[in-house]
């Protein structure tokens, strides 16, 4: 079966520095996949290449079998890639509703309309509102996004991505920086994500990863070290070396 | 043919003199924009201040030329330290629009003050006798002052480049321009570095304004009129670079002189069009690293 | 928080009609100030155009005078040199010319950022200034273009010496422009512009064609500025170099920051306050005028970034706070 998202031989170098080396990666429909690796392994670079923010030095990215390597960010979003950022990248001075509505409207094709007032677009508003309800944010719809506590902002981040109705959702450290009191909220939201979306989580938090992922890829120094089920990864000696070995050398 | 070659030499000569002055004035802007990432449109104010100090020093206070020139450098540098500590430093983290508006405000204030104190007319430059007249070079006569300009500027520029390449200060500047966060984390006191570099850049601007008072007339509208050229030198040369603006300044100096001589009816038209073209081809400037 | 977006009520509040009522009142009560009034109306339109691209889309430009000046000169040249004197036709021509320049320059400079973008806006404005300065046979050069005749509007309303026709004409045109800008701001397009200004990275990541939106906004803004310029020419029956270059761009920025950037009525309050103050104070002490403007600019940036409207907002919020 064609994987929903695939990379073949993906490479990225900045001059002499190689950040990604020959990455072959497959993401199946409905997958719950995690990408882990020590700091500086190249995880965020990989995500940026998937979303089109960064162009690879070599290799290809395929979405549903279609080669999207040459496409820009907006085009990839239209084809079904959504992402969240490691650091909250919201429209801080706009309302929570607007944060989500912008992406929804774009998907509906009405985001560029000059004439009708935005408020009139009932479908967009309703859909944005429903997303907020799904994530428990409906009371904050009218609040300024920047005023929300950090954990809720993280949820808005996810809501924005969901508003794109993506086939593939890339979550870059979704619970990063969230105090533990609020992180259960986020984990609950992740659990409740629609089953037909293929999800890739990039994270350090092993608890989250093992709770959530069905498959795990380990990225070390730009290369995929190993891939497998959580049990396989937990028992893998090389993975232990990479994580624990680093501490010994430090 | 003889006449054509002669005019070529003349244009090259005057163009280089003009370009050098442009560079001495603008290099401070390039370094501080690259270092502090601060859009300082008011840089021309420092050049103007230097010019006023020189002309006033020569004609009103009867100072000698070297003294007036030195004063131009140090007074402007000192003044810039006060401005930087009091005002500029508060806006380092402000967004670009605010920096632009702030520096435009400074220009307005400076222009008004200059007009109130000195009047609207161009300041006359009373050069000492030993620098006036003609200077023979390679069998031709050139204006002595321009020869002095070129020689003096070359010396200043050489000192500056040496300073940036060889001294600790220079190394710190280069590090901080390259990666400020990194520089801070290895213990470089960026605050003091900024102030010092800002002072040096502004002092140089003052010096350039003073030296170039004959070429770039000292009048209250100075910062507005020549802002575009200073910015062109920096944006074509590349922010934070030393060599880039030098090439850019010489190019502009010579091109501007040539255009004014051969096609005066077009004025600065070609320079602006060339700037647009160059920036579209190389948005980071000829030698710049970041946009 | 932004007043635009999907939750913002686009209906015109009654308070928004007050400025128009005031403007109509001025026509009857202060007939000797009508020429100044027309000038204020023109600059409000100019400021609205800049606010669209600077306040809402976040594009910093120092060269908006290029469109203003182009519109002004097109109206002047068509009238003085080609005998086209119908006022509405001249407006249309100015809008078209400014729009063409807007889309041509916008397409090019909106691909750049930072200093390069700023520099390009300056350079383009400088080119326009140089052309107007040097092409003396067409533009009148440094002396400006005289001999501009404007037909009566609709054949009936002649431009009189007291500026009455001009005032009403500018008021109506401003109303159209205001209505257009207001509609754009409250539309999904306006929300997208605000999003671009707030967080361009995010906009790319939600699939918005950022560049295309910016070019459209820039072109619309250019057309409005061009119309404003043409209105000025028609009102004064003269066009000179002072409509081009850094000065009008700089002054407009001051007006906008004074009123409050990124707010519809900042573009109304700013020019109003600035031009009235200039009329009253600058005549006696022109140097002190620029000194004052510079000081206000510095103070506003350091302490009152929202401009006059921002200060008013702050006062209102303080009164509304429970005791």
Image (tube, rainbow, N blue to C red):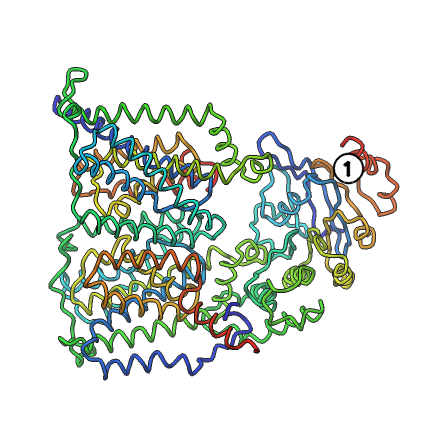
In front here: B269 or B128?
A: B128
Quadrant position of the N terminus of chain B in the picture: top left
The residue located at (15%, 15%) in the rendering is B139
Residue hosting label 1: A225
Q: Is residue C117 depicted above or below A15 in this figure?
A: below
Q: Is residue A36 depicted above or below A32 in this figure?
A: above
Q: Position of residue C62 (x, y in %)?
A: 34, 53
In front here: A237 or B245?
A: B245
Q: Is residue A2 left or right of residue B18?
A: right
Residue at mark 1: chain: A
The image quarter containing residue C301 is bottom left
Can see residue C261? Answer: yes
Q: Is residue B120 left or right of residue B274?
A: left
Q: Position of residue C121 (x, y in %)?
A: 35, 50
Q: Is residue B141 depicted above or below A111 in this figure?
A: above
* SS label for mark 1: strand
The image quarter containing residue C311 is bottom left
């Amino acid at each position: 079966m064609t994987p929903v998202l695939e990379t073949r031989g993906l490479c990225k170098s900045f001059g002499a520095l190689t950040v990604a080396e020959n990455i072959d990666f497959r993401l199946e429909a409905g997958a719950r996949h995690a990408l882990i690796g020590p700091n500086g392994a190249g995880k965020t670079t990989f995500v940026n290449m998937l979303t089109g923010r960064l162009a690879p030095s070599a290799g290809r990215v395929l979405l549903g079998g279609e080669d999207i390597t040459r496409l820009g960010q907006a085009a990839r979003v239209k084809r079904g890639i959504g992402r969240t950022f490691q650091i909250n990248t919201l429209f801080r001075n706009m309302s929570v509703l607007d944060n989500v509505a912008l992406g929804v409207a774009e998907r509906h094709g009405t985001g560029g309309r000059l004439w009708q007032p935005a408020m009139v677009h009932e479908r967009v508003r309703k859909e944005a509102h429903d997303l907020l309800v799904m994530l428990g944010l409906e009371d904050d719809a009218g609040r300024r996004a920047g005023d929300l506590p950090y954990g809720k902002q993280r949820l808005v981040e996810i809501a924005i991505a969901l508003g794109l109705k993506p086939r593939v959702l890339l979550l870059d450290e979704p619970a990063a920086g969230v105090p533990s009191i609020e992180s259960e909220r986020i984990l609950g939201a992740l659990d409740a994500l629609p089953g037909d979306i293929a999800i890739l989580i990039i994270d350090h938090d092993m608890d989250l990863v093992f709770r959530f992922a069905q498959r795990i890829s380990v990225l070390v120094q730009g290369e995929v070290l190993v891939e497998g089920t959580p049990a396989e990864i937990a028992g893998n000696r090389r993975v232990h070396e990479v994580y624990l070995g680093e501490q010994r050398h430090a | 043919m003889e006449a054509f070659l002669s005019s070529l030499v003349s244009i090259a000569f005057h163009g280089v003199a003009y370009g050098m002055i442009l560079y001495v004035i603008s290099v401070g802007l390039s370094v501080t924009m690259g270092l502090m990432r601060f859009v300082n449109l008011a840089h021309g104010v420092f050049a103007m201040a230097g010019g006023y100090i020189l002309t006033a020093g020569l004609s009103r206070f009867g100072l000698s030329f070297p003294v007036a020139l030195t004063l131009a450098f140090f007074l402007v540098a000192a003044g810039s330290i006060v401005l930087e500590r009091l005002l500029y430093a508060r806006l380092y983290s402000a967004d670009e629009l605010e920096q632009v508006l702030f520096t435009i405000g400074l220009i307005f204030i400076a222009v008004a003050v200059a007009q109130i104190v000195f009047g609207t007319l161009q300041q006359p430059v009373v050069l000492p006798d030993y620098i006036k007249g003609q200077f023979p070079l390679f069998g031709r006569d050139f204006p002595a002052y321009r020869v002095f300009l070129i020689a003096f500027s070359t010396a200043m520029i050489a000192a500056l480049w040496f300073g940036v390449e060889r001294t600790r200060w220079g190394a710190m500047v280069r590090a901080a321009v390259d990666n400020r966060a990194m520089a801070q984390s290895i213990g470089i006191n960026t605050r003091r570095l900024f102030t010092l570099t800002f002072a040096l850049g502004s002092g140089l601007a003052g010096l350039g304004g003073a030296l170039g008072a004959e070429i770039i007339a000292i009048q209250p509208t100075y910062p507005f009129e020549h802002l575009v050229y200073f910015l062109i030198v920096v944006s074509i040369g590349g922010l934070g670079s030393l060599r880039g603006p030098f090439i850019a300044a010489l190019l502009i100096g010579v091109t501007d002189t040539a255009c004014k001589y051969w096609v005066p009816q077009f004025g600065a038209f070609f320079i602006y069009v060339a700037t647009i073209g160059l920036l579209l081809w190389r948005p980071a400037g000829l030698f710049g690293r970041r946009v | 928080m932004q007043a635009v977006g999907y939750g913002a009520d686009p209906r015109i509040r009654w308070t928004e009609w007050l400025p128009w009522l005031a403007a109509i009142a001025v026509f009857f009560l202060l007939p000797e100030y009508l020429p100044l009034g027309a000038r204020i109306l023109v600059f409000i339109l100019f400021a609205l155009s800049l606010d669209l691209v600077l306040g809402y889309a976040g594009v910093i430009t120092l060269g908006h005078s290029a469109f203003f000046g182009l519109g002004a000169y097109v109206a002047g040249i068509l009238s003085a040199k080609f005998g086209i004197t119908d006022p509405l036709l001249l407006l249309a021509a100015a809008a078209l010319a400014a729009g063409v320049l807007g889309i041509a320059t916008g397409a090019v400079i909106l691909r750049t950022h930072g200093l390069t973008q700023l520099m390009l806006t300056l350079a383009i404005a400088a080119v326009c200034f140089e052309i107007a300065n040097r092409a003396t046979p067409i533009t009148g050069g440094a002396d400006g273009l005289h001999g501009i005749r404007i037909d009566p509007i609709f054949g009936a309303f002649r431009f009189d010496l007291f500026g009455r026709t001009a005032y009403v004409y500018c008021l109506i045109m401003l109303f159209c422009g205001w209505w257009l800008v207001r509609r754009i701001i409250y539309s999904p397009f306006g929300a997208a512009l605000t999003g671009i200004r707030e967080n361009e990275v995010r906009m790319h990541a939600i699939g918005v064609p950022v560049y295309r939106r910016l070019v459209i906004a820039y072109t619309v803004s250019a057309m409005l500025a061009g119309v404003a310029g043409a209105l000025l020419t028609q009102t004064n029956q003269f066009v000179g170099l002072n409509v081009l270059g850094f000065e009008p761009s700089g002054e407009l920025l001051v007006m906008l920051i004074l009123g409050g950037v990124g707010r519809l009525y900042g573009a109304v309050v700013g020019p109003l306050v600035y031009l009235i103050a200039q009329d009253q104070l600058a005549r006696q002490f022109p140097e002190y005028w620029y000194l004052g403007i510079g000081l206000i600019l510095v103070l506003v940036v350091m302490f009152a970034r929202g401009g006059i409207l921002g200060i008013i907002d702050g006062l209102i919020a303080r009164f509304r706070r429970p005791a």
